[in-house]
Amino acid sequence: MKGDHAVAANASVAVRLNALQQEILVGIALGDSLENVLTTFCLGVEALAPGAICSIAGVEDERLTFIAGPSLSESYTCQLAGIRIGPKVGSRGTAIYLRRAVEVRDIESDPLWTPYKPLVQPYGLQACWSCPIESLDGRVLGAFAFYFREKRGVSPFERMIAGECVKFCAMAIENAEARTRLNNLAFFDPLTGLGNRVTLKNRLGLVLQRARELQRAVAVYHVDISEFRAINDLHGRVVGDMALVKVAHLLSDVASDSDLIVRLGGDEFIVVKTVLSDGFDTEQFADAIVSRLRGRYRVERGDEFAIDVRVGLAHFPEHGEDEDELLEHAEMALICAKQNGGGYAIFERRIELEQRRRRALERDIGLAVEREQLAVVFQPQADAQSGIIGAFEVLLRWNHPEHGPIPPGQFIPAAEANGAIHDIGHFVLRQACYEAAQWGDKLRIAVNVSPAQIVKSDFVQIVSDVLSETGLEPWRLEIEVTESLFIQDFAAAQTTLRLLKRLGVTVAIDDFGTGYSSLSTLRNFPFDRLKVDRSFVSDMINNAGAAAIVTSVIGLGRAMGLRVVAEGVESQEQLTMLRLLGCDEIQGYLFGKPLPAEHYAHIMGTQVVFNGICEERPATL
């Protein structure tokens, strides 16, 4: 009969143990928190093994973390959290370190517990048995422990229960780790650790709803790193990533009490802050963001880079009552800050009107080629000493059916933004080459090309096809590029320009001196000419600084074997000074305005060689 009772008891324990394990599996499957799952587990184990106090710890960065132990004092478990594991760190810290079970029958006398006896004595804990919790791949995830209120060892029965249950602890911890990893991937930026777009989408609406209930305003800040592409191009993407991490840390510091700080992607961030105090100044906070982030920084590998930022600010509910509208208006304000060159800008309704006009412009410019609204004009380039016309620069004009002539400074960025620049660029190139091929003289034709065109892989083929189609000799075509090209894609730019040179096409760098890395640009690319920006030429007579820049550029061009073209020459004084400085070529209203080809037919039809040797009469203006 006694044996029958033992068998029945064992069967009962097996049934209860199986039920507990099933309950743990259900909790894991339903996505219950790790703490709740393992708290239930501990209470179930204690019901099976009366007299034992069950506890489970994790390990993170070689330190103990408390997960569950409902029968232990909270003050005791708080003191255990953060203790570094080691060979003499109580039962649990030692079990994790040695990766084997550790039994301490008398905490009072055991050396493993010497530093920690004061922690347990107030709670009557006198013995402890612990075993490591290991994953299937052999990682130690934490430790399972039985505490006892009497001096004794663990019984075979208790050891058996622990052995059966510890694998379920591992399963629960690994599942929680997997959920954490998925959560991080889904809601956090892996580089900076900030929230991502999904976090912004999920939480901004809740922030606004809370603000409505509290009748409070919310400030939305759109933060952008100025010229971030230049950091990547000059220092490489590793340093670029370091710069982003630095910005994230600085932003987290200055906006630590904000509702949300997220990275949208690239070099853009969003800060959302509820205005809980009537004394809080949203503009001062925008200025604080700019001031805190702006500066020069050095990374561990020795690279130094400068960070400057622009911030767009929109207010809830003044500038929008839903998240999409607020984010859009903050972005509009950011665009305004970039255009104005200020540190930050606040959304205004006029900005929205300007944005709408810009979008309408983008829509219309996309149809301008098809509707035959575009035309090319020609401006002469003359030899500075003789005045002989050697080339014409082709410029684009757009006569809008409703708004009349639109300046290139407005419609070119719009065409670049919507992708229409590729068709427009092809149109200009073809028109220019076709016109030049009809001229009686072998004058050059210079065509401005957008960076967006250059970096496309088919650009060189397009140039080759146009030359073949129109019959224009390659040496008569000059492609003009700006330094912004090299910020956009340094490697693609270098490859494209070298392939153009192989075709026999010449290459000029336009607006020289206004980019971010002029000397580096000249050293790395095969230019034939460099053009001094008109802003320097227009100021050179009355501004010593501008005169010094023009002098330096001309000297630099001569030293590098490049011909220098001065743009924007409008007065005899400027021409005289440029001649004295040794400038090679002149372009500007003094010699001719941009006009349709027929206005210069008398020049284009003469026999003039660019080197100034005239076969017939020189063509001068």
Image (cartoon, helix red, strand yellow):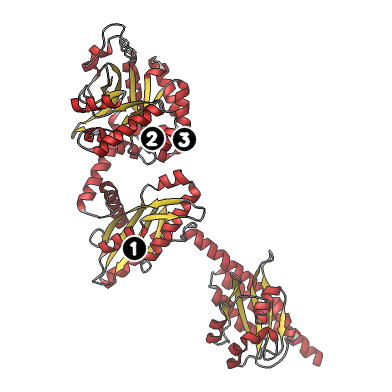
Find residue 280 and report its horizontal and vertical position in percent: 26, 69
Other residues around mark 1 within 10 Å, as few (<14) / some (14–19) / many (≥20): many
Find residue 557 and report its horizontal and vertical position in percent: 37, 29
Per the image, the residue denoted by label 2 is 451
Per the image, the residue denoted by label 3 is 492
- Quick one: label 1 or label 3, which is nearer the N terminus? 1
* Quadrant (top left, top right, bottom left, bottom right) of the C terminus: top left
Q: CA distance from mark 3 to mark 2?
A: 10 Å
Residue nearest the viewer, comparing 483 with 133: 483
- Please state which amino acid type lies under the numbered disc 3: Ala
Per the image, the residue denoted by label 1 is 272
Q: How many marks?
A: 3
- Please state which amino acid type lies under the numbered disc 1: Val
Residue 25 seen from this side: yes
* Quadrant (top left, top right, bottom left, bottom right) of the N terminus: bottom right
Foreground mark, 2 or 1, reads 2
Residue nearest the viewer, comparing 174 with 512: 512
Residue 53, image quadrant: bottom right
Q: CA distance from mark 2 to mark 1?
A: 35 Å
- Please state which amino acid type lies under the numbered disc 2: Pro
Q: Secondary structure at mark 1?
A: strand
